[in-house]
Amino acid sequence: MTEHLFLGLAGMIVLGIVAQWLAWYIRVPSIFLLLLAGFAVGPISGLLQPQALLGDLLFPIVSLSVAIILFEGGLSLRTVVLQDIGRVLRNLITIGVVSTWAISAAAAYLLLDFNLALSVLVGAMLVVSGPTVVGPLLRHVRPIERLRSTLQWEGILIDPIGVMVAVLTFEVILAGEMQHATGAVITVLVMAVVGSAIGYLTARGVVWLIQYRFIPDYLHSAVTLMVVIAAFAVANYLHDETGLFTVTVMGIVMANQRNIIVRHIIEFKETLGMLLISSLFILLSARIQLSDLAHIGWSSLAFLGVLVVIARPAAVALSTLGSDMTWRERAFLAWIAPRGIVAAAMSSIFALRLSAAGYAQATQLVPLTFLVIAGTVALYGLSAAMVARWLQVGQQNPQGVLFIGASPLSCAIAEVLQAEHYATCLIDTHWPYITTARMSGLRTYYGNALTEEALDHINMDGIGRVLALTPNDEVNALATLHFAEIFGRDETYQLSPGEAVDDPALHLRGRFLFDETANYTVLSRQIEDGAAIKTTHLSDRFDYEAFQAFYQGEALLLFVISAAGHLMVHTMDTPLAPLPGQIIISLIPASILAVTNAVPDASNAGDTLSQ
């Protein structure tokens, strides 16, 4: 029995991570493959039987996993953004929730023949979105910034709201009749107060312990996880289902305090969250029985159609009334509403509890929810990019540059590109570099470029390529691999390592910038010595050959701007040959600048030389 349990748990974890890996490789939503994998090893082959494998532990494991995932979501929610959110976002998490709830409940009652109580519960469970799906989908589609921000924050905010709505409905049902709603509302208010108090106090306690160094650095993440689990257990002990609200509040409080930096905790929870999401989807989808799938028919597909064609468009239409959004932006918002892990977990938890309470129809909650998840993930995931192109709300051929590293070298290049009206953003974990860049008016992100959080929170508006300009060659290589998912291999660049580049692992690196001598040490020393990044307009009278002659062949070509405004990067594998009518951006050594100081502007050098 022990060996069977071990093999089952190990297989679940391995299968979940492999599904995530394969989804990245073939560029499809990972949850779609996780669902397929769970169905394959569960109801189809019978290799994994969660109820037999875990028994009474199934419900606690699911609940605890969801708690950690919601804590992760809370850590991503910064109140500074809430202060500036638009009316559309506020409406989506209020009016949109209510309209989605009402339409989904009505559809369940009319199409699925559920009783009123279960219909209202189904509607409540399905108001949540899927931030674990929305994030990767937005990175793939890359819509304009306003749409990206709205969808991202809707996905984060709507989950705890959806959980509270679902718990409210669940408490009403367990009370016995819908007329007990007043008592259930009071119960939920008590849950909110108790959950908020426990979440706030535990979060402040962890912050205090870390701030005054009662916890060593290497235990920060472990102790935080311990407190999350303890707070969840205590809150649930005091009142059923209060724990989910507690951990969400705890995450929000920790994310918005100013006494400690929680970036390393966030990085840890990303790894743990990925593991839990992968395993939990395999576990929950494998739990479905073939007999449960028999309930899925044309009425279930019609219910899914109502969610996609009526519920979401109606919620968006009501939420955007009077806004300045164009019809194209509203149409794209109306097309993106996937459901994810929170809906799956709630359906499993509620189905277990309601079945034990004697609700026979509760067995249909899980297969119906998974149909909605699989249907919305497949539909939106496979069509969103095409819809964005059709509606012209995606970023069409963006030319801006994302810099990994905010050193003086990166800042010097970014300032020139920004002056030429190209979007730039600099990422670094070194706060003095970030401060200097911000004071220069450059867009920055303070954090680790290699985390999933960075992919979700960096403002990519106008960005079309990445340049890794750190002194660490391994970091540069990892960064180009990390961002190749977004920009493609052709638009990921890194500095030359300053040594032989005939490395057999070149496929694991970005394209090498400029030339083999232009490594970080050389370029940074030149910037420190007074070298300048200059733009030069080429013409028939002053072509690239004349330009190089003027600067004695010492100018290092960095970029070429075509007549159409396309930014081309000079690389070792594809050296550029600038033409008259184009603009070149180059690095001029300080020693050469001293010689050419007599010429006010290199772009006029042709006239000077001809005199």
Image (cartoon, grey):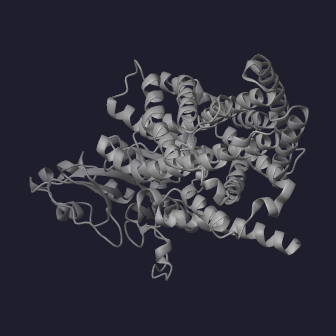
Viewer can see residue 407: no
Q: In which quarter of the image is the N terminus?
A: bottom right
Rendered view: 30 above or below 434: below
Is residue 137 found left or right of 157 in the rendered image?
A: left
Rendered view: 106 above or below 403: above
Viewer can see residue 542: yes
Q: Which residue is drawn at 54% across and 22% down?
A: 95
Q: Residue at x 53, y 53 (%)?
A: 405
Residue 364: percent from left, percent from top: 65, 46
Residue 348: percent from left, percent from top: 72, 47
Residue 169: percent from left, percent from top: 71, 29
Is residue 91 found left or right of 551 in the rendered image?
A: right
Is residue 119 found left or right of 606 in the rendered image?
A: right
Which residue is nearer to you in this view: 190 or 432? 190
Quadrant of the rendered structure where residue 39 is? bottom right
Which residue is nearer to you in this view: 370 or 154? 370
How many marks can you see?
0
Rendered view: 184 above or below 565: above
Residue 226: percent from left, percent from top: 86, 48
Q: Residue at x 66, y 48 (%)?
A: 366
Which residue is nearer to you in this view: 278 or 212? 278
Rendered view: 372 above or below 311: below
